[in-house]
Image (tube, helix red, strand yellow):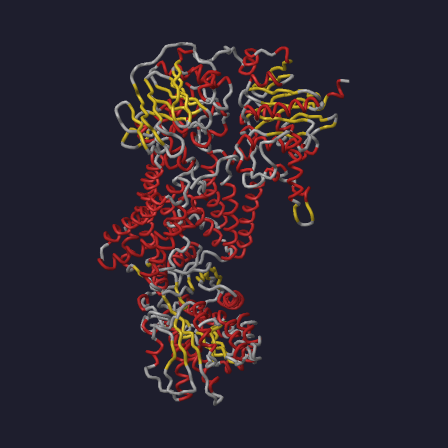
Amino acid sequence: MKKIIALLLAVVMVFGLAACGGTSADNGSGTESGTESGTATGLDLSVHHKVGVATVHEGEAWEIAKTYLETVVGPTFNMEFIYSEVLHDANGLIAFMEQCYAAGCDGIVNLVTSNDAIAQGAHKAEEWGMWFTTQNSAWVEEVSTLEHNIGQCGASPESVGEAYKMAFKQILSDGQPHSVVLFEGAAVGGDKGQGAASHFYSAVGVLEAFQETYGLTYDKPIADLVNQQDPGEVNTGNPDVHIYLYPGRNPGDAVTALLPVLQTGNYDCFAAVFSYAAFTNAIADVEQSTGKDIKVIATGQIEQQTKTGFESKDPTGDTVLNGAILNDLSLACAINCIELMHAYSGDVASMKDNGKTVLLGVRSYPILGADVYAKMEKINTAPELYILTSEDLIALAQPGVTWQDLEAKLAEVADVNTLLSSKGL
Amino acid sequence: MADQQTILEVIHMDKNFGVTVALNDVSFTLERGHVYGLIGENGSGKSTVSSIIAGMQTATKGDMTYKGQPWKPTSMLEAQEHGIGMIVQEAGTIPNITVAENIFLGHEKMFKKGPFIDRAKLTSDAQKLLDELGIKEFKASDRTGQLDMQMRKIIEIAKCMYWKPEILIVDETSTALSLEGRQFLYKVMAKQRDENKTVMFISHDLDEMMEHCDKLTVLRDGVIIGTLDKSEYEPNRIRKMMVGRELKGDYYRSDYEGYSDEVVLTAKDVTTLNDLLCMNLELHRGEILGIGGLSECGMHTVGKALFGIEKVLDGEVRVKDGTLINSPRTAIDHRMAYVSKNRDTESLGLSATIAENIASTGYKINAFFGNLISFKKEARYVDKQIEDLQIKCAGKNYMVNTLSGGNKQKVVFGKWVASDAEILVLDCPTRGIDVGVKASMYKLFTDMKRSGKAILLISEELQELIGMCDRILIMKDGQVTREVMRAENPTESSLIDYMI
Amino acid sequence: MNEKKKANPIRKILESRLFSQIMPVGLLVILTVIFGIATKGRLTSAASLKIIVEQALVVATVSTGGAFIFASGNVSLSLGATTVLTATLSLLAYNKTGSIAVMFIVAIGLGVILMTVSALLSTALGVRVMYVTIVMMTLLSALQQAILGGSTVSLPYEVVQKLVKGGVMYIGFIVFFIVCVVLFHMTDIGRSLRFIGTNNLCAEQTGISKAKYLLIAFIIAGVGCGIGAILAIIRGGSVGTSTLPSLNMDCMLALVLGGMSIFGGSKSYVYSGVVGALTVVVLNQGLLMIGVDATIIQAIRGIAFLTLVTVSQVRPKGLPAPEG
């Protein structure tokens, strides 16, 4: 009997929840992608659009981006979003796109970042006449000429590298000799499409910052140094400056391998091309035993983990995290939706460069110190504080606005100080 | 006063399992100082009624009074605390713990000393109980796993007696016990009666029931057929009450027809890893060959070795055409059949349907095009057996575990009869089966023999061997030590002599 | 003793064969109808139904083959890894030769070989199928990782289109399914496997060789993996290390949702995988269409599955524990 009751409850739950969702979803359904590209019809915000968002993300930063989509982008553009579960591959993406298609979506924002998922997804979208836009740092040429594939945006690897370089230049600017252990992640081959391009350029950025600050004479070109398979010390030509490179995808292994290197006390900086979380305890142990502070610079997002890093103290009294290279998911999502609006207005051409998709660079923000982070954190907390506000969105979605204009806007909001002052922070 | 003597009354009790009626308007009274017997065929409802009294399940309708109060136990524990204890048919002891721990299983709290259990007191209390009951074969501190099944059954009896039950229910316990074990049980029951308490005894063994019960109540299909006083006991009358038709006292075969000279199965110097050592036998067409012996003599392994289940290390088993039997498949291909002593675990797929079980021997027979099975042929294959063997079931698509023991065994026979086996190796085929089905089985054996089939009957029941077999082989230490012909008219005691 | 078995009417219904056969199909129909109404017919439109079927095809195919193994009371955990590795290698074979025929032959051949190895390891070493397949699962995944590294292999889009237009997915599935239905329900193979699943000691004593039929089951499952691999290639266009990560679990889930007992045996049906796979997709798609959030869909799915598994796995009390 209990089992029957359980079954009934489950059924009631399933349909109960379904009914809740039903009311919001049913108004204005049945939208067709009525506009054809080529003939611009102007920005018409009265037409409701359903957009499928295929995500590879989860967690706090993603929730912030979702809130932005729900509270700002959606109402502004009269868009309704359907979100996927966390997807990893082409199969998942395509299954989700099929469901979106059946549910009446006419646009897809794709955050699944594997090249062939993007390629397969774009083909599928083309087949069905759904508009398709992607976040990825590498441009996928294979599908760049498909009519319904309207664009890509993402943190360009070079810009991430640039952010690392800027962060380190600032840290090294005190006139003292500094040394670094650099966890390169999947940097090896990143410039040749094998590893991760952003990891590659991040490592290059760090090495360049050291070279330019101290006038180092590496015995190999920087790209070759980064592409070395084996971990080891780099010949810097300066006895006071040590650089140790560790390539590898597994943070756990890296911690084990790097702990003895850090224990030598020769290094006072640690950089990771992604999250620092796995290294927190190891670095604290080293600081405890050597009594020397180690500065930590890593990739982060606006979320609790980064905040904690900036606000908590390490054993030497310094903050645990000294610099974060911040990526903002919300901004990239906004750009994707602007591209979709151009497509809905029949203005695909201005989003493309001679009929080919363009990779728009969303910059990473180098954040140094808790005070800057405290301000940066306020971005994305209120409608007027988002990097792109409702007004910005409408302005950028006007027919006639080109991809060059979007690129210019991205450059404009790329500088931390300018951005913060423009928001009155 | 009679009323003060009454300890338990069952009034108009019904029990249904879905559409099956297990008890139908059952009423009876138990008085102090008596041993009551409850007898009936498998599925007659005797275990149901006793388990309701002992709190294992509840009745669908009807009332009970116990010591003058309404009695509605919700668990065996409640019944136990109020003085109704039951030794169950199929309960078990846990092998990895001591005898004492088994005796107090679930009641360890009584020995709590702070957060710990006072093991010393637990063991000494258990030992005291064993001493009281006069059990000397094992000690309370012994590990249960080292004891044989008999001794474990005795632990269960002791466990029940600890609570000094006013009504002791003994459900089919004696079947698992040896002679000494039974004597012990009878002693416990007699003591119970002498102390002006009550015993309710359930068994298949008519002789045992007649000897030890003051009154016998016969159940059939959930209805009380009648209650007899000791003076009215008469075996044929009781059997008739049980099965509802006239049963001749002797349901074994009475002929001396003999058998053909043609040898259909030969075992030569068969030796297995554990039990058999140079075992030899020849089975003839139209013969029922019995194998008997003490329980350790290896006779159960004979069946397995002949059928290719047990690996034959030395020696060989061959059928008439000279084929070596080394796997069940070759055995079946040469029209052999095997019924295991462990019916539920080896001879049946309990959760499969009756049809699936019977059809399991006929995949090849019922194929019509390559390996494609003809549903029609298969249905006929199954239906014929259900009809011929009169398997009592609600339908062939019901699971076998809904059947009573006797009918289960009929299903086992059904699958082999259907396959038209010529050589049947039967290991204790009538074990745990009531008289009615037993009689029909014996008739089936006789018919098979007459139609030229060969039957090897391995049995622990001497009466059965004497009554049914053309020849009896007595085994000891993995070898055949003695051959007894039907014409010799052996007696039970002569066979026992040969065994020892 | 059986007559003591507690059997109330509802339990009786749950235990009945007809219920276990009809319930899953009924549930699928009910879900489809309810979501059809809730989405104002959008879920039941031809295009949407086609999508539902196509989404279910890979799981349906692999689990239909897998049903043969599960029927025998054995749990195979390597179906997913076998399918994915097979897909990888057959795609590589296509890229080497440019021949679709070669890709098909490699896929089915490899599926069969890999599963046969599992079966032989299990019978030769006398190790339970589950343990062997855990090892195989890890081994095959590692092999795929070693072959691909972090990269993926893909089939050119034109080829994918050609195969889709040619109806290869449907033909592949339907032919395999029909063959499986015949083998499972109309020959000694299915009956023997079910009987082994019910009681393998009894099966052995009835002349049904466990080793032989298990090998046959694995070969059929291998063909299923091969065809499933082809379907996965056509659907995804590419294969990488993150392709179909939960395929094996999805197949087991589909079988159970489709009314098959996880203990195998008598209540085993070859179509369970298909019904179950469709049910999962309909539930997903329906909830998504009426606007339920993805995370809530996951939660609902979890609850619904747990409930269904509990209900559909009602086993009569007092049965011996299944072997293997």
Name the residue at the right extreme: B1
Name the residue nearer the viewer: B235 or B499. B499
Name the residue nearer the viewer: C67 or A130. C67
* x, y percent for residue B24: 61, 21
Asked if residue B266 is positioned above or below residue A128 in the image, the reply reads above
In which quadrant of the rendered image does the N terminus of chain C lie?
Answer: top right
| Quarter location, residue C219 | top left
Left/right of residue B5 with respect to residue B304 in the rendered view? right
| Quarter location, residue A342 | bottom left
* x, y percent for residue C220: 32, 43
Disc count in the image? 0
Rendered residue at 63%/15% (across/down): B227
| Quarter location, residue B314 | top left
Name the residue nearer the viewer: B278 or A251. B278
* x, y percent for residue B212: 62, 18
In which quadrant of the rendered image does the C terminus of chain C lie?
Answer: top left
* x, y percent for residue A259: 46, 73
Name the residue nearer the viewer: B53 or C10. B53
Res. A404 in view: no
Rendered residue at 46%/58% (across/down): A85
